[in-house]
Amino acid sequence: MQSISLDANATTRPLPEVVEAVSRAMRESWANPSSVHRSGGEAKRVVELARESVAKLVGCQERELVWTSGGTEGANLAIRGTLEHLARATPNRRVLVTTAFEHSAVRELAQRMEKDGYEVVWLPADRNAHGTPDLESLEELLDDRSDEIALVSLMWANNETGAITDVARAGALCRERGVRFHTDATQWVGKMHTDFAALQIDLASFAAHKFHGPKGVGALYVRRTIRVEPQCIGGPQERDRRGGTENVPAIAGFGVAAALAQEWLATDGATRGAILRDSFETTVCHATNAVPHAHTTPRLWNTSNLGFARLEAEAILMLLSERGVDASAGAACSSGSLDPSPVLLAMGVAPEIAHGSIRFSLSRETTKAEIEEATSRVIAAVARLRASSSTAIS
């Protein structure tokens, strides 16, 4: 049975050009890029060419990019690095503003910062745009407490529902009041047009493997004039912002993935992907009475989160896996949990629906034939589980 991946928000298959770039760098550019000899200089050139490519993809200056190990480290450097830096410079700024439906890299870090003595303000969800923060509440909070707030951190596109936050407005609200703004752009970059320079964003974290690059490498955009306290100590790399020898092969692959993403974004790929996603979602919901989450608000073209009432997500995923369909119950890093998604619960989704909610996410490589086949397999799997459930109850 052909395997069909509808779990692109967890990760994507590295493109052949990316694999070749990583392999070539491992063969030819294995020297330490901090070394002053010719081989080190060649490795440094590979790193800087990749930085140039990624900067073009996201619309920023090359010097504003810090290499990281991925989205989680980038978010940690942005948030903890800001709070620790401002704790020294302006001790009265000890408030972090975020939401309960962030990725765990932000949500759980915020919970940790609370234990460390910082105050965290959890913004409510927008009642008219489920899965995004209420920016009216943010504006009121900024008006009242801007001199206490160190950072506002809001994800650009939700990893579980695809719901898109108006980061242009959020950034403008923060900039007007002299408050730093960070966005977790991990699900956005490489899938949608990005221009950090055109937006009032101070910090943005993202990762290569979400758009057909290698795992284990990401970047943090740090707007010039912004300072963060480094979290990896022990070297002068990345302008003293992130110590440690650069992962040259992964960075090389990141650069190629960025260039290919930029080419793809110039096509109608996102529009075609949205058509496939909508076809899948409409057919499955009609056949199974599934509840689509965040479908009334702007979403990423590739994401569909469906709730199957009175079914368990784990059972659905196991049966889908047997039938060759890969999907997730929320974030991939929490797939071992039997608890309903905290993101969906924070959005106000009823527990009996959240328990049976599955995230399906497409990649640039997903085909119409795969969607049609996956649709049939999902409908059949849900029907089988409901039949089994009815038999057990009777």
Image (cartoon, rainbow, N blue to C red):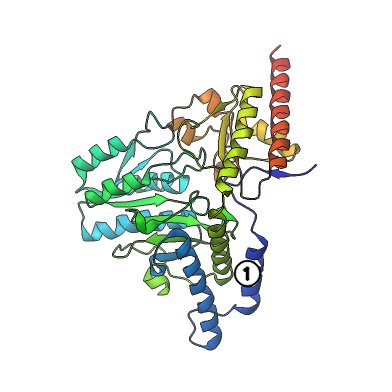
The quadrant in which the N terminus is found is: top right
Q: Position of residue 298 (x, y in %)?
A: 46, 37
Q: Position of residue 41 (x, y in %)?
A: 51, 83
| Residue 251 at least partly seen | yes
User: Which residue occupies the extreme top position in the image?
Assistant: 394
The quadrant in which the C terminus is found is: top right
Q: Which residue is mark 1?
A: 21
Q: In this rendering, is residue 7 above or below 228?
A: above
Q: Position of residue 294 (x, y in %)?
A: 48, 32
Q: In this rendering, is residue 176 above or below 140?
A: below
Q: Is residue 334 left or right of residue 116?
A: right
User: Which residue occupies the extreme bottom position in the image?
Assistant: 37
Residue at 54% in and 66% down:
255
The answer to which of 274 and 185 lies nearer the viewer is: 274
The answer to which of 94 and 331 lies nearer the viewer is: 331
Q: Is residue 320 left or right of residue 340?
A: right
| Residue 359 at least partly seen | no
The answer to which of 351 and 277 lies nearer the viewer is: 277
Residue at 44% in and 41% down:
164
Secondary element at tag 1? helix
Name the quadrant containing residue 374: top right
Q: Is residue 86 left or right of residue 367?
A: left
User: Label 1: few (<14), some or many (≥20) within 10 Å?
Assistant: many
Q: In this rendering, is residue 391 above or below 144?
A: above
Check disc 1 and give the amino acid type: Ala
The answer to which of 333 and 134 lies nearer the viewer is: 134
Q: Position of residue 195 (x, y in %)?
A: 41, 56
Residue at 20% in and 43% down:
145
Residue at 30% in and 63% down:
227
